[in-house]
Image (cartoon, helix red, strand yellow):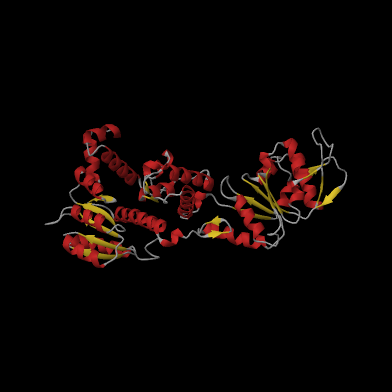
Amino acid sequence: MSPSSAKERLLIVDDSAATLEVLQRNLTAAGYQVFTSLSVAEAVEILENTVLDLVITDLKMPKVSGLDLVRHVRENFKDTEVMMITGYPSIEGAVNAVKMGAEEFLAKPFTDEELLSAVRRVLDKVSLRRSAQSPSAQIVPVHKGLIGTSKAMRKVFVAIGKTARATATVLITGESGTGKELAARAIHYGGARSSAPFVPVNCGGIPEGLLESELFGHVKGAFTGAIESRAGLFHAADGGTIFLDEISDMSLAMQVKLLRVLQDKEVYMVGSSRSRKVDVRILAATNKDLHDLVMKRLFREDLFYRLNVITIFIPPLRERGDDILLLARHFITKFADELGKPAPGFSDNALQGLRNYDWPGNVRELENVIQRLVLMTDGDVIEVPDLPSLMRFSALRKTGFTRTLAEVEREYINNVLASVGGNKTQAANILGIDRKTLREKLKDR
């Protein structure tokens, strides 16, 4: 959610009226709805009467400190985040603020860019948590077995709807684990052939010597062991759809025979000189670049153009945004129901880890990870330590290359200091610098 699309509500608490004025002006200009308070007591009253997304508080204030306000917000307003700012930076102050529940610790003086970046990071976490926990997130949108609301998946749904009504051959492309077979099933069951068979074939999983017999059948005595005639998968799919997955793994010799089926709509059983007409719609899928294989003479050009009448690309999971959370919720409910146990939730940092991870295995990998988490987690909430190691690292970083070098360094120093309880000597050793350099860097923050 961006501030321009829906105004997020911020409360700034500082005993300096001048500071409040500057911060309010900058954040209002960025598109936020901003409330201000000169004291913690006044801030508590505003919190009681206003739904807020973020509280930005000074650390040192008369009577009641910012740390007390952080504690109050964490204990009473679970859906509101807190960010600490101070003109008196110290390791102890930063550690205490984080322990109390502040998401960011920003030392004065800071630039407008540093302020806005910190605010956006915190609000992005709020948005992520709400999208995962809102009632609408529990009702996972399913389109003929496919789950998603992202722009990329909406394009896929439109393409499926159009091709389901047609009879043309469809080539479905995308990385392994993206759901190409689900898309093929959606095309079949959304069209006129839905009451007829849908026959999936993994071309890469059948030995080359058996693939022709499996697809087209064989007559008795066609080869050693053929003790009786047997129809092939094309015969089984007659009137319906055959789905040829991993078609790029098919040999050039088999490609010639498949091309004949596409051209003549008839198949020859192995060992027979007579053809048999079949009425089969062919859907094919690959995780490879068929055009590149054609250029390398590893795939027949004429077959490529026969298959490539309509192409549907299934996007990788890493490009599908919050679909990751929808799918995680779907799988966690599914596996919890299978085990007869309550479905656990996710902590904010665990959600961030799922969202930031690149998912090279796509939806299939996510399904496997969630199944393992549901099986192995005993508590009500899945935390970062429960995640696989690569995702635990993802939970500590921000996606993309939008931060300055100073921001990255500052975050790393803060993480190191927090990990050693604020011990500057230990932190300096880990960072590979001396204590004096560390002190200078802390001043710069």
Quadrant containing the N terminus is bottom left
Residue 122 appears in the picture as rendered: yes
Q: In which quarter of the image is residue 428?
A: top left
24 to the left or right of 181 = left
Given the current orientation, which residue lies at the most extreme left position?
Answer: 63
- In the figure, is residue 297 to the left or right of 20? right
Residue 356 appears at what percent x and percent y? 43, 47
Height in image: 6 above or below 153?
A: below
Q: Does 386 appear above or below 314?
A: above
Q: Nearer the viewer, residue 428 or 362?
A: 362
**In the image, farthest residue toward the bottom:** 49
Which residue is at a point 62% across and 59% down the rendered structure image?
160
Position of 145 with respect to 33 (left or right) is right
Residue 18, given in percent of the width and then of the height, sits at 18, 62
Q: Is residue 65 left or right of residue 288?
A: left
Residue 206 position, x and y percent, is 69, 39
Q: Which residue lies furthest to the right in this view?
A: 273
Q: Quadrant of residue 66?
A: bottom left
Q: How many marks?
A: 0
Q: Can residue 39 be seen in this view?
A: no
Q: In this view, does 1 lie above or below 304?
A: below
**Picture coordinates of residue 82, whole percent (x, y):** 27, 55
425, above or below 186, in the image: above
